[in-house]
Amino acid sequence: MLNDAGPFNFLLDTGATHTVIDPSLAQQLQLPFIGKASLTTVSEVREDQLVRLKVLRVGGSEVSELGAVIDRLDQVKLKAPGIRGVLGEDFLSNFDFLIDYKERTLRFGGNVPTGDRCRFETIGSYHGALTTNRLLLDAEFMDVSNGKAQLQLDTGAKMPELFPERFGSVSRQPWEA
């Protein structure tokens, strides 16, 4: 729910630093423009409009006064028609949540399930520039010389992706969305 309107279909993406909404939804809800935000994708870096969401609610969990980036979401809509936005880490980091793939549910709060735990960081660096709102995991690749790496947990990715240290135009920019 956005500003007590909805519900609207959103994609949950732990790889997105900002919540993103489609321009037609921003226009429909007459969301106030508050500035610009840099949006970085695998293929480009661009500036988009930033609007203020009075309240963004998923189930009983909500965040007030959240900034959201306006984007057409063309690539997302190709894979998931009907999507009106993306829940990013700026929303998700306010909660403990469980993604239960077997039951196909997302649960905010509640009892902590048993199982393995993996520590993560939310602040890292890329080519010396600070990155925030990322779920970064330390990993080690066996049978590889100096096989240590920091990986980003990204629920929006279809499969694991590894990027070389230099990757197109984005390699000169911090990984922020």
Image (tube, grey):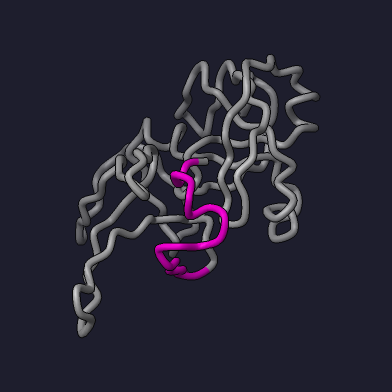
Q: Quadrant of residue 109?
A: top left
Q: Position of residue 5 (x, y in %)?
A: 69, 23
Magenta region: 159-176
* Residue 13 image position (x, y, % from top left): 51, 48
Q: Quadrant of the N terminus?
A: top right
Number of marks: 0
Position of residue 8 measured from the top left corner of the image (x, y, whole percent)? 68, 36
Q: Is residue 97 left or right of residue 1?
A: left
Q: Residue at x 75, y 21 (%)?
A: 29
- The image position of residue 2, as x and y in percent, is 63, 25
Q: Nearer the viewer, residue 10 or 73?
A: 73
Residue 75, located in which quarter of the rendered image? bottom right
Q: Main secondary structure of the magenta part?
A: loop
Residue 24 in which image quadrant: top right
In the picture as drawn, the residue positioned furthest to the bottom comes out as 143
* 78 horizontally vs 170: left or right: right
